[in-house]
Structure formats: C-alpha cells, structure tokens
Amino acid sequence: MAIAKDQIKTDYPLPVYNYRVDIGSETVAFSEISGLEIALEAITYKESQVASGIAGPNRMYMPGNPKPLTITMKKGLVVAKSIPVLYNWIQSTELNRIEKKDITVHLCDEKGESVVRWKVIDAFPTKLSAPSFNANTNEVAIETMELMATRMEMSEG
C-alpha cells in the first residue's frame, strides 16, 4: 500500500541535516549544533518521619531553577566568513563589552522552510577552538564555539 505524500509530511520525523542558524540578524552555516536542551535543577526536601514511626528522613524531590544552556556549534573554517563573525564576537566579550545575542536554529522541510525553531535567549561565547591539525589527513578544518545562554524557547515554523 502506497503512502500519500501529505501523510508522509505529517506522520514522519524530519531529517536533522536540513537546518539553518541565525545569530542575531546574520545567518551563519554550521555543520553541527548540540546542547539545545531545557533542564531544571532538582531540589531535595527532607523531613523527619518521627510521627509515622519510620526511621530516617522522608525525601521529596521538586523542580528548581532552570539550568543555563551550554551550546556547542561547529563549522568549517572559511576565512572570509568565519573570522569576522565568531572571532569578533568572542573578542568583544573578552574585552568586557559583552554582546549577548539571540540564536535561532530552524529545522527546515525539503523546501527550506522553517518547520520547528529553537530560540536561544541571551547567548554569549565562552570558548572558540581552532581546528585540530594533522598532516596525515585531508579533513576539513573545523572550528568550535561554545556558548552559554539564559534559556531556550521552542516553537513551530
């Protein structure tokens, strides 16, 4: 039995290779993005169980404050495009001119239209790593940037 094209669009997961990343107002190409997660601290509350006759404390767990995000972004090193965007951003942070930016990762359909987006709020760079150098390989030079952010929002399209 053949599956209709519309059913495939609504019932099947999207592939992860078709995405784009906006840093502020600029669109920057990355080969890998990781760390888009919402996590909460766990609070442990202990109370005595003397009244119930059971030895030891009664433990209860509750959600606490949101944890900050740590995002890792990797991209091929292209001198004309990489150095101005990423290097200048971390350089300004190093000079105490912290420039926080919102980053939006769009997961796109086969037409390149945004279907789901993750918006990272108030991100700033904490680390920029140069590629690993090895004369025995012919791999692409990949630079890595790590960011911290306050929170993340997820929405459709």
Image (cartoon, rainbow, N blue to C red):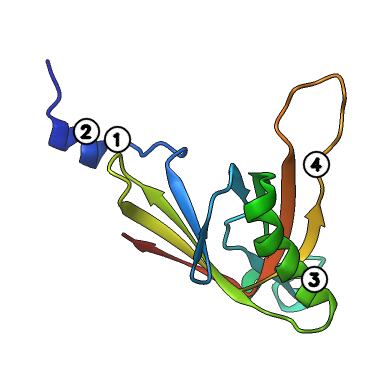
Mark 3 vs mark 2: in front: 3
Instruction: Give coordinates of residue 122: x percent, y percent.
Output: 61, 76
Say which residue appears at 74% left-offset and 37% top-offset. Answer: 141
- What residue is rendered at 54% in x and 49% in y? 29
**Dot 4 alpha-carbon crowd within 10 angstroms: few under 14, some 14 to 19, many 20 or more:** some
Q: Quadrant of the N terminus?
A: top left
Please, which residue is most extreme toward the front here? 80
Is the Cβ of the residue at disc 3 closer than 8 Å to that at disc 1? no
Residue identified by numbered label 2:
8
Q: Amino acid at mark 2?
A: Ile
What residue is shown with label 3?
A: 91
Distance from disc 2 to disc 1, alpha carbons, whole Å, reads: 5 Å
Residue 87 in sight here = yes
CA gap, disc 3 to disc 4? 18 Å
Please provide percent x and percent y for residue 102.
55, 72
Residue located 65% across and 78% down the image: 100
Residue located beneath label 4 in the image: 131
Q: Which residue is mark 1?
A: 12
